[in-house]
Amino acid sequence: MRTVLAIARKDLRQRIRDRSAIVVGLIAPVLIAGLMSLAFSGLNSFHFTLGLVELDHGPIAAELVKALEVPQLRQVITLRPVRSVAVARSEESHGEIAAALVIPAEFSGAATGEHPEALTTITSNQATVPGEVTQSIVSSFAAQLNADRLSFATALAAGAPRSKTSELIGLVSGLRIPLRALERPVGAHELKVISYYSPGMAIFFLLFTIGYTARSFFVERSQGLIERMRAAPVRPVEILLGKAMSVFVYGVVSLVTIAVITSAAFGADWGARCLPSLSAWPLSSRSSVSRPS
Amino acid sequence: MTKSFGSRLAVDGVGFSIAEGEVYGLLGPNGAGKTTTMKMVCGLLTPDKGTISVAGQQAIGNLEVRSLIGYVPQDVALYPDLTARENLEFLARLCKLGRRTVKARVQEALELTELTERRDDRLDSYSGGMKRRLNIAAGLLNHPKLLVLDEPTVGVDPQSRHAILERVQAFGRDGLAVVYTTHYMEEAERVCNRVGIIDHGHLIAEGTRRELVAKLGEQDRIELSATGDLEALAAACRSVEGVTSAATTDNGVHLVACEGRHLLPAILEAADAAGVAVTSVDVVEPDLEAVFLHLTGTALRE
């Protein structure tokens, strides 16, 4: 094992002295990841202003507004009250709002009747995402409302007295749809571009490091250096292991350094478990090679 | 030892033994099979047939025996981006030496090559001669019983060459068994106690210089410098009675002949008849080159 370590140490020494290896293993990945992060920094968050045309002012409309104002959506949606549908269309066309939601008059009253009013989403065909997000939130609210309506109607059909309507509404409104498909918005857990590019670049340039070692092996062979090693009491497998160990150690040190720099300087998220694991690799490999064979 | 590469027979039944303190020269032209033979001795190639024994131990496939052999390859096989000390330390560690021993042997090698003051300079800042010296010293790190030097003076300036040859002679005096391959006759004559002449993978003669030259009998070597058709000159000389062999060189023809001095008029007459102008004639005492010429019919440096 001492032979393997001697070869690995020699290779690492050569690697450290080779400035191009430092550039490829460290500087280039950090630089490119940083530049990519800067270039795409605008894509880090999604946010839009939603115009709200509230013509009902009833209890169910108030619930819907509450659903739009939940803390999880504050990073994504800013609600802006708008007086009328016409004003909403005008503001949308001028770009003051990205989409609008219209709660019609008598919406709350009709919701418990046989002919409920429809909620309308005003959106642009230029930027459809805000409209789709609004539509998704409203659909979720409508699904709950429809479930409440169905529960109420079922109770009445089963003989519940109409005199106890208010109690029934109280009971029904406490119920929630037990099973539903949830789509969590990306904005709720922001994925930074640097968090994507840092590991990407580190692994990409790690391939160059591996390629460099393979090339250096063949250069050493053509220069008679491998032959000289083999003339010593050294097995070919020890030469290969030594070279593999140098790539491994260099790769891990490179990854850890890139991870630390991009985390500290750019706030890249390498994952809570990733960094300690990366840091532990060299230690674990060192302890495994130092065990007596 | 016998070794083939595909259908090409590189070494065919070459065998020799070397005693402690003996410098054995393997003399032959390029492509004769010297390096292949040395690689088999060092365990870098496995012979197709034959046995190799070093200090009484079977060497083929025996890793331990490599500790007894010091190998100095033909080209400088050291890392140019490492210092002399780092190169030597690395190679010493490969010989499974302990830390203290490594340090001592490296110091010893640096002193031997007179490079102690420059031990921490990178090898790419060294002159060709310094690299060669270090290349040889690296082969001595394990204190070998057998030192194999594969044409260590190729491409070396005369001063460094002289120093290397002095050192090789000293290795012999120090009790080391040395195999020295070369295609320079003068080097073989100067440093080797015994010489094996190898050509086309065959060991065609072996012995001390005196023994080999004795094979020529009372023959002389005649060197003709000439301009014109040298092949025609060689053919003309062969037709002269008493000339046993003739081979062209870069600027003339080398002959081996009985009673060489007495044949000179006939040789010059034959040259004249072949239409070749002879510019100088030199009759030299029999040497290894004459032996090689006599045995193979070709000049050593052809």
Image (cartoon, rainbow, N blue to C red):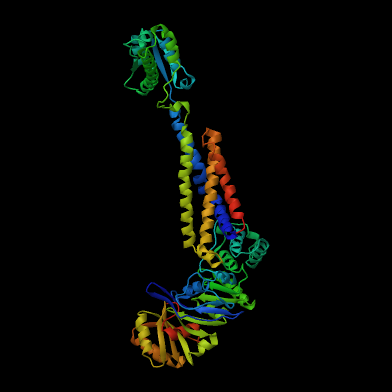
**Quadrant occupied by the C terminus of chain A:** bottom right
**Quadrant occupied by the N terminus of chain A:** bottom right
- The residue positioned farthest toward the top in the image shown: A163
Q: Is residue A201 above or below residue A60?
A: below
Residue A203 x %, y %: 47, 44
In the rendered image, is residue A94 in sight?
no
Q: In this view, does B212 lie above or below A97?
A: below
Q: Is residue B99 above or below residue A173?
A: below
Q: Which residue is found at the position 52% from the left and 47% from the top? A: A251
Q: How many marks?
A: 0
Residue B81 x %, y %: 55, 56
**Residue sitting nearer the eye, A70 or A232:** A70
Residue B121 x %, y %: 60, 57
Residue B72 x %, y %: 55, 69
Residue A56 falls left or right of residue A19: left
**Residue sitting nearer the eye, B209 or A248:** A248
In the rendered image, is residue A241 in sight?
yes
Within the image, what quadrant is residue A276 found in?
top right
Residue A119 falls left or right of residue B20: left
Q: Which residue is found at the position 47% from the left and 20% from the top? A: A74
**Residue sitting nearer the eye, A203 or B298:** A203
